[in-house]
Amino acid sequence: MFSAVADSWSVRLRAEFAQRLMKARKGLAAFAIMAGALGLGMGLAWNTGLFGGGSAAAAAQTAQIREEAARRAEHLAFTEAYLDHETREMRVASGETLAGLLVRAGASRDETNAALASLNGVYDPRRLRPGQSVSLFFSDARLTGVAFRSEPGASVTANRTTAGFAAREVLMPLTFENARIAAQVETSLYATALSLGATDREIAALADAFSYDVDFQRDVRPGDDFELVFERYYDDEGNTVRTGDLLFVALETRRGQRNFYSFLAPGDARPDWYDAEGKSARRFLMRTPINGARLSSGFGMRRHPILGYSRMHRGTDFAAPIGTPILAAGEGTVVRAGPFSSYGNYVRIRHANGYETAYAHMSRFARGIRAGSRVRQGQIIGYVGNTGRSTGPHLHYEVMRRGQQINPINLQVANGRNLTGRALELFNIERQRIDTLRQVRASETTEAALHGAAAVATP
């Protein structure tokens, strides 16, 4: 009996022990799971920067990685069209639009509309001109890209992406140089300088430098020599994108050789023109207060074109289109501005030393020009017109000395400011620098010409 009781107790004891062991194993398993979860969470937290001071840096690094990936995707979208494509070079025909060119090249209407829509806010296709080159890219007969020069130094591209077409303007790298133009006048000084790389800005500055003693209509002829040295920025195709300062101008006409250097004298607000000795190119009064005009009638006796009889013409007439700017011949005070008898719209300016100048037949006056206003030399005071007793648009220009009209063309007046002392020393340093630039560029031009001649001579 005792044996049966013992066996029964042993069975119960083993069962209880097994139950407790199972509970212990379950507890250990739960602990292991919790510990594993805690370890995983700690690892994730550590990797995302939740511990320590590196969380902000890690987040920034992640954002940077994503941004770089986006840029790479964009770059791929803009360049993948060029990896496997057919290029078609087209030129805009007279009266043709960009849409018409795309269709003519083989693009579908949907592709054309999508490409043009992508240009909104980037470029106005109406700015394209006849003869302008446009590069088109096709892959499997589908339009994948459009590219053209929007202006010197910039190109526009519109390329197919996964979401349609995307366009952008790409600025080309620019190169700086001190450019030199030395040539003979062909048909005109203006046209010759433009054809050799100068812009309207340089030509206007040249006209300003010589406006005090050169009549560009009568003094400058084909075959005359001129020289310009100016700062230039150009693109990868050699096109002038913009220009900086004009440093030097020279002109040789039947009246002789004239060289002027640009120099900002101490105390001055803007540069001015001086000859090699530091004497100002400016005169007390300008001989021709208008640019690009033709001398149509000189000072002296003439048969009046309207009245029909001979009378004294006490001024000089310059024929020019309506709206051409008229400049103040010198600094002074406006004493009259308004309609005046047969002169039409008329301005009269009082200068120093008993001189006055008058300007007649204007179409209108410049802003702020009225009796009592001060004007500076070269300031626009009005615009060419045909008011008053006049047979065509022109400027009638008079110069008076103590009330007596004199011939503006033969006017002999003193120079402007001449440099002395420290200002002259600084000018001489700048003049030597500019002359060195001229010599270097001249030697480069000569060397290039010799190489070109040798290449032509080589069989």
Image (cartoon, helix red, strand yellow):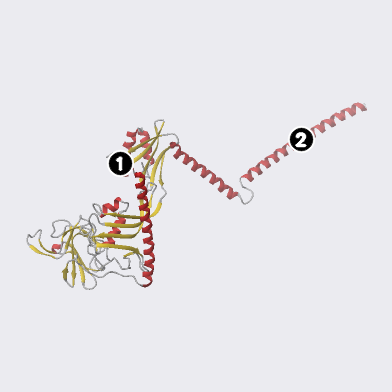
Residue 109 falls left or right of residue 344: right
Identify which residue is drawn at 33% across, 42% down: 125
Q: Quadrant of residue 3?
A: top right
Question: Can you see residue 164?
Answer: no
Helix, strand or loop status at disc 2: helix
| Location of residue 211 in the rendering, given as x and y in whole percent from the top left corner | 25, 62
| Location of residue 132 in the rendering, given as x and y in whole percent from the top left corner | 32, 42
Residue 25's disc number: 2
- Is the residue marked by circle 1 packed among few (<14), some (14-19), or many (20+) residues within 10 Å? few
Helix, strand or loop status at disc 1: loop
Comparing labels 1 and 2, the label whose residue is closer to the camera? 1
**Identity, as a three-letter code, of the amino acid under mark 2:** Arg
| Location of residue 273 in the rendering, given as x and y in whole percent from the top left corner | 31, 64
Is residue 355 positioned above or below 66 on the image?
below
Question: Can you see residue 209?
Answer: yes
- Quick one: quadrant of the N terminus? top right
**Identity, as a three-letter code, of the amino acid under mark 1:** Gly
Q: Closest to the observer: 62 or 256?
A: 256
Residue named by callout 1:
131
Identify which residue is drawn at 38% across, 57% down: 440
Between discs 1 and 2, the one toward the N terminus = 2
Q: Closest to the observer: 57 or 238?
A: 238
Q: Quadrant of residue 396?
A: bottom left
Q: How many marks?
A: 2
Residue 357 falls left or right of residue 175: left
- Is the residue marked by circle 2 packed among few (<14), some (14-19), or many (20+) residues within 10 Å? few
Residue 394 falls left or right of residue 24: left
Q: CA distance from mark 1 to mark 2?
A: 88 Å
Residue 33's disc number: none
